Image (cartoon, grey):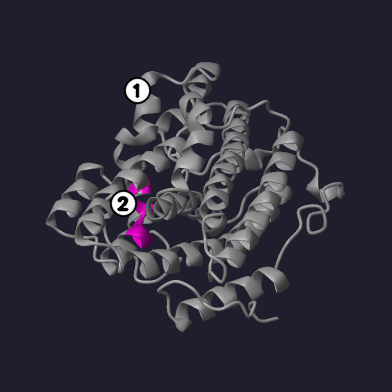
Amino acid sequence: MTLSTAPPTGPFGEAYRETLQTLSEGSVHRRFDPYLDIDWDAPEMRLDPDDPRWVLSPVSDPLGATRWYRELPRERQIEIGRWRLANAIKVGAAFESVLIRGLMQYIMKLPNGSPEFRYCLHEMTEECNHIQMFQELVNRIGDDVPGMRPLFRKLSPLIGVAGGYAHVVLFIGILGGEEPIDHFQKALIRDGANLPPAVLRAMQIHIAEEARHISFAHEFLEAHVERMSPVSTAVCGLAFPLVMRWLAGEIMTPPRSFARRFDIPPEVFAEAFWRGPQSRAILSGYFGEMRSLADKLGLMNPVTRSVWKLLRIDGPKARYRGEPDRAGLAAA
């Protein structure tokens, strides 16, 4: 199926339209349904609260890397790991809802014939499926986790809507949320995929479809940033690392109630999120592709590089999408 025959509008060329058509066709022919593609009631998909596979990875999880966690009794490691993973899944669902609000606000302003309208709706459809999948997983894990930290949870409806009126910052924010989650899930799978099968299957589905979403965000920013004024480009150059660091903190850091629930000492919590050398290496590793993209967009200069460094998310650029964080692995 080709895109509609409405006259093309906007300043974008045929290559951009063809890319969006390819992504849209992928969403039609390579899609997943959480209730068709996961056999939730199969015996092997049953989630055991005492499964040792809940133990946090010392390589990819910043709390799992701490000596305090590694020296806990195995039963306590399982309990903490299960809660942390369930909460991370709940956070992923919440972020998807923010993304949907922003995209819906954005596309309803687009003119007829916009090349972005159809694909944005495909992406939102997939994100709705991801929310269903993640919530089903949380329900079956059984821990009553809160998800986002309290302030972000309260502000999230406003953040999504506001993003629809600052579309370039919206897509920087989309990457600021999607990249850490995608990187974290890929790292877990590369680390041996020692996860309960239902969790592993949900992550595989999410990674497969997020590849399209991340590709679209890259293409969107390349198409839009090059048409911005020098002042707007400078603002985006500063916003890029600030948004990345802010959203990584909101999405990858558990709420303080987690530390209170499991009696995690303040110094251990600080070491894990994000003041210890290994946790800082993990945090920086989330953004190798983003540093490459910022450079490609012309948003890296002496001033913006100093911001990346000040926020401790500087480091080597990824040579290709999906490149493992070798520096983080070496630190681990």
As rendered, which of 47 and 152 lies closer to the eye?
152
Q: Is residue 155 magenta?
A: no
Would residue 40 be found to the left or right of residue 71 on screen? right
Location of residue 310 with respect to 269 vertically, above or below: below
Nearer mark to the viewer, of 1 and 2: 2
As rendered, which of 186 and 28 lies closer to the eye?
28
Hey, which quadrant is residue 210 in on the image? Answer: bottom right
Q: CA distance from mark 1 to mark 2?
A: 30 Å
- Where residue 144 appears, as percent x and y from the top left, is 67, 25
Residue 240: image tag: 2
Identified by mark 2, the residue type is Phe
Residue pictured at 57% horizontal, 32% vertical: 147
Location of residue 68 with respect to 308 vertically, above or below: above
Magenta part of the chain:
282-290
Location of residue 157 with respect to 283 vertically, above or below: above
Would residue 105 be found to the left or right of residue 289 on screen? right
| Crowding at mark 2 (Cα within 10 Å: few <14, some 14-19, many 20+) | many
Location of residue 50 with respect to 109 vertically, above or below: above
Local SS, label 2: helix
Hey, which quadrant is residue 84 in on the image? Answer: top right
Hey, which quadrant is residue 81 in on the image? Answer: top right
Residue 267: image tag: 1
